Image (cartoon, rainbow, N blue to C red):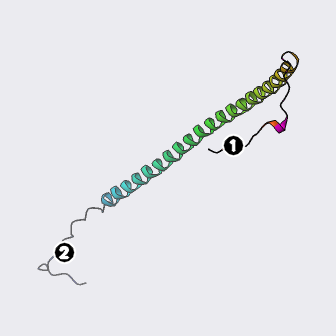
Amino acid sequence: MTSWPSTAEVAVPRPARAPVTLRGRSSARTAGGVIWIVVVAAVLAGVVALNVAVLRLNVELDRLGRERSELRARKALLESRLSSTAARNEMLARTQLGLVPAEPQYVDLRSRRR
């Protein structure tokens, strides 16, 4: 067997390296994730705000539609009253006042230019 000479240098093991941590990469990754969460939250908030605005417009449109229907019904009622009142007035003018409608040949409907 061979023996090693005692004068030989003995190799001293290097000190163990500290394990590589991903703190630098991890914090950048976390920051990127937080940014994406904020962006997605902002987009969702915008979508919700848009939906609320559309809902308000639909409610207003419905109210205006109901109001239009009520106004049309009221207009029809007033037209009905007006036509019956006109007929009644014509009858009263003929019977009580003795008035008759004018003959068309005596009524000049052309505008006069000066």
Packing grade of label 2 (10 A; few <14, some 14-19, many >=20) is few
26 with respect to 63 (left or right): left
Q: Nearer the viewer, residue 106 or 43?
A: 106
Residue drawn where x is 47% and y is 51% of the image? 40
Magenta stretch: dominant SS?
A: loop
Residue drawn where x is 45% and y is 48% of the image? 42
Marking on residue 34 = none
Residue 70: horizontal and vertical position, in percent? 72, 29
Q: Nearer the viewer, residue 113 or 62?
A: 113
51 with respect to 11 (left or right): right
75 with respect to 60 (left or right): right
Packing grade of label 1 (10 A; few <14, some 14-19, many >=20) is few
In the rendered structure, which disc, 2 or 1, sits on the residue that comes first in sequence? Answer: 2
| Mark 2, secondary structure of its residue | loop
* Residue 13 is covered by the magenta coloring: no
Spatial CA span between label 2 and label 1: 127 Å
* Residue 101 is covered by the magenta coloring: yes
| Mark 1, secondary structure of its residue | loop
Q: Is residue 79 above or below residue 10?
A: above
Residue that lies at the very extreme toward the left in this rendered image: 7
Q: Which residue does the numbered mark 1 point to in the structure image?
A: 111
The C terminus lies in quadrant:
top right
Number of marks present in the image shown: 2
Residue kind at label 2, given as amino acid type: Ala
Q: Nearer the viewer, residue 105 or 4?
A: 105
Residue 21: horizontal and vertical position, in percent? 31, 60
Q: Quadrant of residue 80?
A: top right
Q: Nearer the viewer, residue 47 or 95?
A: 95
Residue kind at label 1, given as amino acid type: Ser
Q: Which residue does the numbered mark 2 point to in the structure image?
A: 11
Q: Is residue 30 above or below residue 108?
A: below
Start and end of the magenta stretch? Answer: 97-105
